[in-house]
Image (cartoon, grey):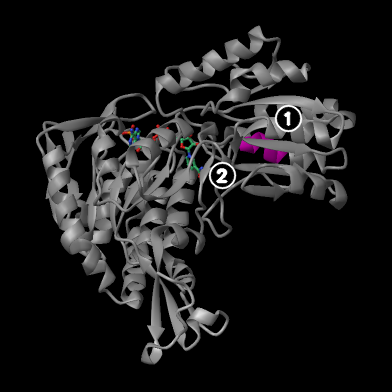
């Protein structure tokens, strides 16, 4: 059993330790609040309670929204853009200094291996340092009025303005990076931010709030709403929230849209990608990357590979190669040397995966590798084969996203069959294509209903240098440097009419 206690001095007012239990406060418009009511935070490594986090009441949230809406959003808007970028760059530097504390917290709270935790922190630092690139996209437009009879002798400037307050709802799988990314584009564009952290692993979010505070982030423009999702309807619906930037499952996303009402949205929802392996692919590379797409961070990635489609002539050879790759994966406590796959976030996620294995086997699926539970929160990476391409479509794994290291595999005869199988899922986040014939690859590129395609690699969104986001049930909008600016800003058209000229052509 461990407790989640950062060591650096800057975090000393974020938590208090009482009788061996660590109580985290939460940051609300400049104050660290201990509400006296708590959410238990467990480690997926051994399910022990590693901290208790102050849970906010609606009164706390209501008063935070009032301050953010009446003071915070203007405080950000009035900060010059260069200063906003400077604050984020300072945060990158502070995050770098606090790296070791963040590694410990991500390992303990999210069950990541040290190198996965380091990867998330490095991506977060890079994202903060890329804020100046987002700034390059905050452009408006000058429009001459010459081209319409009614606007001659007038002209307009179309400004891109901040909308006000962004609610950033964070999933458990990248608690630090998703918080950083949503704060960067919202704040650079001139908005205040309310962050709703995941209840499973809110600790990295709270530590990052401290990083922002010491980096000069306007204190009235930030609140961390530590409340369970099941109690968040009122927050989502509040009119003082202008944009909802949500990352999470398609089911929660749908509810959020229904509750939010008339607002702007960025919705990054469920995924589970197809990998299509063509007969002329580099087989070793395709097997290696497809396997990694299944097991990395225990399959708890929106861009994890969940369906592998292999062209008939190389099917048997590919199967052998990918099974060999999966058999190399060492599963266990992520703090142990050599472990590449840690636990799932909780035991419910394991139950769900076991249900999916059982369902697939009942339908005639064959477990080619794995399939077993290894403890409360641990499983084997798993690959299930279907020969019958119609049966595969009935399986739970095909129809919904099972957030675990498990994928389906089958063969296809021609490109159109691969397109049909890939597009048949309700998700449309990404796809991977392995192969070399550009004409065949181009056909797939044109017909796959997805937001991003990775040729000769597994899908990986990384820092968002290239934009990503879903089609169909995988979402609305795009995350990515520069691209997300569109969803957290609004146009304002200012028409200059000189000497009251311009022809009144239409009767009002
Ligand atoms: P989730 O269960 O949908 O939760 C996501 C967030 O929504 C959590 O903060 C959760 O809070 C909150 N929430 C739950 N119910 C809510 C409600 N009624 N109103 C407002 N907020 C609510 O998803 P997850 O299990 O954390 O994350 C995994 C999912 O995220 C997967 O489906 C994955 O594909 C998706 N994801 C997508 C992308 C992408 O780019 N498309 C990236 C990463 C992850 P609580 O934790 O308190 O319940």
Judged left or right of residue 269, residue 89 is left
Q: Nearer the viewer, residue 382 or 353?
A: 353
| Rendering quadrant holding ligand 1 | top left
Location of the C terminus by quadrant is: bottom left
Location of the N terminus by quadrant is: top left
Measured along the vertical axis of the image, is residue 149 above or below residue 491? below
* Residue 298 in the image, given as x and y percentages of width and height: 52, 32
Q: Do tag 2 and tag 1 residues touch (Cβ < 8 Å)?
A: no
Measured along the vertical axis of the image, is residue 280 above or below residue 38? below
Where disc 1 sits, the SS reads helix
Judged left or right of residue 37, residue 93 is right
Is the CB of the residue bearing disc 2 within 8 angstroms of ligand 1?
yes
Q: Residue at x 27, y 74 (%)?
A: 79
**Farthest top residue in view:** 362
In the rendering, which numbered label is found on residue 470? 2
| Neighbour tally class for label 2: few under 14, some 14-19, many 20 plus, Cα within 10 Å | many
Measured along the vertical axis of the image, is residue 23 above or below residue 68? above
Residue 14 seen in the figure: no
In the rendering, which numbered label is found on residue 421? 1
User: Which badge, 2 or 1, is on the more N-terminal residue?
Assistant: 1
Q: Residue at x 30, y 48 (%)?
A: 195
């Amino acid at each position: 059993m461990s407790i989640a206690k950062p060591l650096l001095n800057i975090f000393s007012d974020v938590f208090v330790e009482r009788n061996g239990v660590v109580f985290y406060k939460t940051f609300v418009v400049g104050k660290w609040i201990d509400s006296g009511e708590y959410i238990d935070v467990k480690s997926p490594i051994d399910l022990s309670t590693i901290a208790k986090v102050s849970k906010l009441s609606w009164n706390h949230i209501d008063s935070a929204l009032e301050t953010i809406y009446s003071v915070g959003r203007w405080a950000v808007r009035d900060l010059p853009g260069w200063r906003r970028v400077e604050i984020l760059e300072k945060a990158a530097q502070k995050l770098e200094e606090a790296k070791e504390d963040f590694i410990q917290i991500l390992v303990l709270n999210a069950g990541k291996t040290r190198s996965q935790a380091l990867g998330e922190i490095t991506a977060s630092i890079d994202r903060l340092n890329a804020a100046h690139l987002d700034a390059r996209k905050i452009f408006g437009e000058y429009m001459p009025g010459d081209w319409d009879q009614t606007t001659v002798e007038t002209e307009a400037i179309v400004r891109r303005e901040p909308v006000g307050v962004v609610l950033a709802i964070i999933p458990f799988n990248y608690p630090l990076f998703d918080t950083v990314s949503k704060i960067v584009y919202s704040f650079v564009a001139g908005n205040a931010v309310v962050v709703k952290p995941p209840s499973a692993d809110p600790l990295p979010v709270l530590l990052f709030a401290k990083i922002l505070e010491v980096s000069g982030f306007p204190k009235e423009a930030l609140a961390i709403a530590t409340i369970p999702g099941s109690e968040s309807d009122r927050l989502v619906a509040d009119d003082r929230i202008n944009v909802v930037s949500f990352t999470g499952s398609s089911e929660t996303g749908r509810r959020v849209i229904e509750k939010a009402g008339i607002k702007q949205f960025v919705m990054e929802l469920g995924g589970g990608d197809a990998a299509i392996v063509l007969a002329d692919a580099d087989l070793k590379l395709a097997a290696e990357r497809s396997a990694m797409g299944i097991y990395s961070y225990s399959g708890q990635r929106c861009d994890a590979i969940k369906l592998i489609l292999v062209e008939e002539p190389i099917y048997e050879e590919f199967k052998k190669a990918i099974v060999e790759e999966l058999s190399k994966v060492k599963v266990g406590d992520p703090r142990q040397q050599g472990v590449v796959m840690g636990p799932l976030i909780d035991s419910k996620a394991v139950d769900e995966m076991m249900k999916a294995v059982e369902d697939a086997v009942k339908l005639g699926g064959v477990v080619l590798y794995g399939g077993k539970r290894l403890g409360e929160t641990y499983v084997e990476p798993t690959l299930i084969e279907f020969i019958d391409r119609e049966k595969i479509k009935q399986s739970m794994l095909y129809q919904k996203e099972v957030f675990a290291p498990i994928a389906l595999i089958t063969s296809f005869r021609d490109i159109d069959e691969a397109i049909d199988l890939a597009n048949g899922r309700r998700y449309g986040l990404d796809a991977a294509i392995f192969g070399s014939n550009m004409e065949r690859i181009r056909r797939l590129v044109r017909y796959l209903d997805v937001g991003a395609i990775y040729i000769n690699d597994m899908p990986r969104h990384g820092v968002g240098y290239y934009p990503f986001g879903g089609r169909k049930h995988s979402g609305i909008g795009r995350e990515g440097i520069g691209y997300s600016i569109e969803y957290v800003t609004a146009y304002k058209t200012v028409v200059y009419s000189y000497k009251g000229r311009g022809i009144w052509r239409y009767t009002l």
